[in-house]
Image: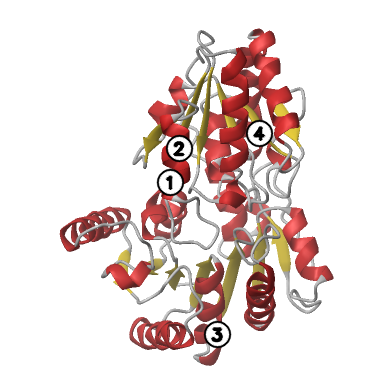
Amino acid sequence: MIKRLLMVASYPESIVGFRGELIREMVARGIEVHVAAPVGGRGATGDAGGEGDAERSAASSRLKASLEALGATLHDIPLSRTGMNPLADLKTLAALMRLMLRVRPDGLFAYTIKPVVYGALAAWVLGVRQRTLLVTGLGYAFTGTQGGAKRRLIKALVRRLYRVALGRAHMVLFQNPDDRRLFIEEGILLDTTASRVINGSGVDLAHFSPVAPSTEPVSFLLIARLLGDKGVREYAEAATRIRQRHPQVRFRLAGWLDDNPDSIAAHELQTWIDDGAIEYLGRLDDVRPAIAECSVYVLPSYREGTPRTVLEAMALGRAVVTTDAPGCRETVAPGVNGYLVEVKNVDALCQALQRYLETPALIVQHGQASRARAEERYDVHRVNHSILEAMGVDTASSCPAGLDPSVVR
């Protein structure tokens, strides 16, 4: 039984939204939860968000207060989400080891690439008894083909680091079967390491309660970091084409520019706005109003772990158009709660969106099916129970109906 757990995350803004309920459930089981994340100065996150010291300090204070309200303790660590600076990454590893020596956790839960790699190594060196790693997606190193030699070098390095880190885990969790299969095929996940697939991060079905969609005018929405691999360019091109024939149709985009090598350029975004193809909503603290105002949710991503925004849209009762790609394809039953299209295929994307313009009744029909699918597969409490059981916190005998308690590999 884990008594004191260290959770390591790379993106502070997502901790409460993505892991808040998991933290709450851990605390309810008597676990002392500590959360490590880069909440300090600008260099901590590596993001080029243009925030000043006051804004970062306020955000850090809000996160600290939110975690304390859940019963957890926040610790600041230096960690750059992007970039491959060896000295910076060594500082991250050293900081995690110092923190573990202070906190003395007997359990580790780390997710996203750098927390997984450096959290696992630090915990292994210091003998943390139980180490659970969550692969939430493959990121820039694995997705797409742009970038040439640089991307191949990054992929080779990330694959090697992943292999070392995962080999020191007691349990590796994946959010879709394709990622797990790829890790096995490429020799990243060893036969000796236990692993299983869970249904993403789950979604709070009470917080994201269904709202009837509007069908007049039809409105499409994409929420994502503004990266090429999220299919943002394909979405903008589809918007341009469809609005030439149906100028009343709205295409809305929410998200933010990132310092990821695959980021959309600011001038690209501005061109789409100036041309009238896209209504840009900026970065949203609460996505529910934007989803509630849309008719159909769209995510033309190249690959995901399990796309959180799709789960939120499904919970609110929205039809979904996404790609037949790992992580995305699991969320949609074609013709039931939405459509799957080929990655990077703008023609196919336009055809799928056009179906909702030609038959608006599908918006309501597919939206209701999305809510039912979210209730069946993606309830955050079911997903969290599966995570806790995999960590040895909950026993298999208490696993809710519909969850497979067996450990594969």
- Residue furthest toward the right? 185
User: Is residue 400 positioned above or below 55 on the image?
Assistant: above
Q: Which residue is mark 1?
A: 267
- Specify few, some or many for label 3: CA neighbours under 10 Å numbering under 14, 14-19, or 20 or more: many
Callout 1 touching callout 4 (CB < 8 Å) = no
Q: Which residue is mark 4?
A: 376
Give the residue type that dot 3 points to. Leu
Where residue 328 appears, as percent x and y from the top left, is: 68, 43
- Residue furthest toward the bottom? 125
Distance in Å between CA atoms under marks 2 and 3:
45 Å
- Specify few, some or many for label 2: CA neighbours under 10 Å numbering under 14, 14-19, or 20 or more: few
Distance in Å between CA atoms under marks 2 and 4:
41 Å
Q: Nearer the viewer, mark 3 or mark 1?
A: 1
Q: Is residue 372 left or right of residue 191?
A: left
Q: Which residue is mark 3?
A: 121
Give the residue type that dot 4 points to. Glu
Identify the secondary structure beneath mark 3.
Answer: helix
Where residue 268 appears, as percent x and y from the top left, is: 48, 44
Residue at point 56%, 42% (across, down): 232
